[in-house]
Amino acid sequence: MTQNTVLTQPPATAANGEAESITAIAQEYHDGSEALDTTVQATGADTYARYLEWRNVPLQE
């Protein structure tokens, strides 16, 4: 089984007019089993919680 995963994003334009191009990432799996999605997407809350821990601010549950 061959599974191809391609993630693409259109070029983003910076505020000063410069264009950033984002390269497409392609991964191929040829092992015959289901491919595991190891993509980690942090939410804003996760990122902020890590920032507070880095600043040694106690988190409230």
Image (cartoon, rainbow, N blue to C red):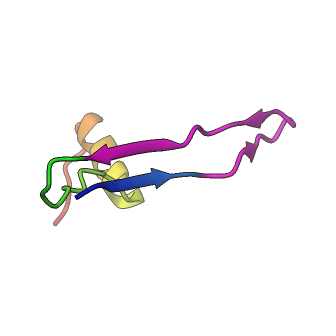
Residue 18 on the magenta segment: yes
Viewer-side residue, 29 vs 47: 29
Quarter holding residue 44: bottom left
The spot of residue 52 in percent (x, y) is: 30, 44
The spot of residue 1 in percent (x, y) is: 22, 58
Outermost residue toward the bottom?
A: 61
**What segment carries the magenta color?**
9-29
Viewer-side residue, 48 vs 27: 27
Give the residue at x 68% y 37%: 21
Q: For the C terminus, which image quadrant?
A: bottom left
The spot of residue 34 in percent (x, y) is: 16, 61
Give the residue at x 87% y 37%: 17
Left or right: where does residue 59 sit relative to residue 15? left
Viewer-side residue, 46 vs 1: 1
Left or right: where does residue 37 sit relative to residue 27? left
Left or right: where does residue 39 sit relative to residue 12? left
Residue 23 on the magenta segment: yes
